Every structure is written in structure tokens, then in C-alpha cells.
Image: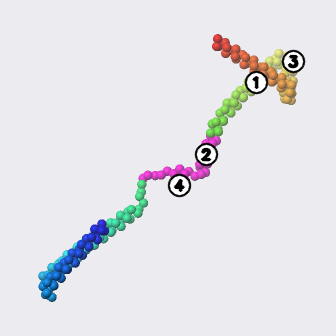
Amino acid sequence: MENNNNEAIFNLMQNVVDKLDEISEKNEGDKNPIPDLTSLEKLSKEVEKIRLQQDSILKEINKSKQEISKSTILDKRPIETNNYKYIMFGKDSPLNTRFLFYIIFFIAISWSGIKYLPPYFSAHSELKQDKDNYELFFNYLYLKEVASENNGTQKMKIILDKIKKGDDKLLKEYNSLFTRYQKQLRKQELENELKKLQ
């Protein structure tokens, strides 16, 4: 745009120079030092035309400069977009390090709770059930011996005292009886399975 304006000014000035050359040649050719009034009027009209053209060109140049300055000002403004960036980590994030530490700690505790607590509760409930069964069995035998009025209650009290003291002989005898009992139960289970298969 600016190059076009420069070229227009250059062409205009060239036309003025050409006209002046023409006039000077006419004057030299006439050898009349006093120019004609008509030629002076024509010259003044031409100069006036050139001045008007020059003013219009300068106005266009100013307009184009203003447009260019407005466009550069518009270009310098930040472009607003409706795209929002969600940042998970960093100084602008809603998650700070303490919050992330709490989340990781909570996940670790929850994971271990899910992994280890249910088997613990089931084993604990089985142990409690076994303890209740043995206690009921012991109370039943004890009350049965008391009701029969035999010497069995005295034997049971002696055995209970030995257990409380931690007698080695009694514990060895208990372990051998318990293994024999387990073997007998296993044998009975296998026989039942054989009967089912036949």
C-alpha cells in the first residue's frame, strides 16, 4: 500500500516536471520574456490540480497509516479463546502436594484393608466358632459327669489344673490323641468319598 502511494507521488511529481519543461521550452521558443496570460492561467490551473491531487494522496496515506496502526493494535491484544486448559499438576492446579499425599495414603490404606482384613475377619470368626464349640463340648461333658455323680468330675478338675500349669506329659498326650483323632476323621472322609464314587 505504501509502495503504491510512493509511486503515485513520484508519477505526480514527474508530470509536474514534464509540464514545467514544456512551458520552459515554449518560452524559450517564443523568445518572449513575458509569458502569455492564458499560459499563466493554464499553469495556475495545472498547479491547483496537482495540489488537489497531492492533498487527496496525502489524505489516503494518512488513512492507510491509521488503518495499519489500528490493525497492529488489534493484533497486539491477547486473543481470547473459549478453550480452557485443566492442569492436574503445577502451581495453577487445584491439587496441591498435601492433597495428593492424602489421596495416595488413603489409597494405600484402602488397598491393604481390602486385601488383608476380610481373611482376618473370616479366620477370626472361625476361631471364635471353634472356641464356642469346644467350650460347649467341655461344659456338656462336665455337666454330664456331675449329673452321673461319678468320680469323673474330680478327674476333669485335675486335668484342668495340669493344663493351667503347662504339664509337658499332658501336652504330649494331647498332641498324640489329637493327631490320632485327625487321622481318624480323614479316614472317615475318604471312606465316604469312596462310597460316593462307587
- Mark before the other along the chain sequence, 3 or 4: 4
Q: Which residue is mark 4?
A: 92
Q: Which residue is mark 3?
A: 151
Q: Which segment did they paint magenta? A: 82-110
Q: Which residue is mark 2?
A: 104
The amino acid type, in three-letter code, at marker 1 is: Tyr
The amino acid type, in three-letter code, at marker 2 is: Ile
Q: Is residue 93 visible?
A: yes
Instruction: Tell me the CA gap for discs 3 and 2.
Output: 65 Å
- Mark before the other along the chain sequence, 1 or 2: 2
Q: Nearer the viewer, mark 3 or mark 2?
A: 2
Question: In the picture provided, is 98 more to the left or to the right than 147?
Answer: left
- Mark before the other along the chain sequence, 3 or 2: 2
Instruction: Tell me the CA gap for discs 3 and 4.
Output: 85 Å
Question: Is 171 colored magenta in this rendering?
Answer: no
Q: Nearer the viewer, residue 30 or 54?
A: 30
For label 4, the SS is loop
Instruction: Tell me the CA gap for discs 3 and 1.
Output: 22 Å
The amino acid type, in three-letter code, at marker 4 is: Asp
Choose top left, top right, bottom left or bottom right for residue 48: bottom left
Residue 96: x, y in percent?
58, 52
> Furthest-front residue in view?
29
Q: Residue at x 21, y 75 (%)?
A: 15
> Furthest-top residue in view?
198
For label 3, the SS is loop
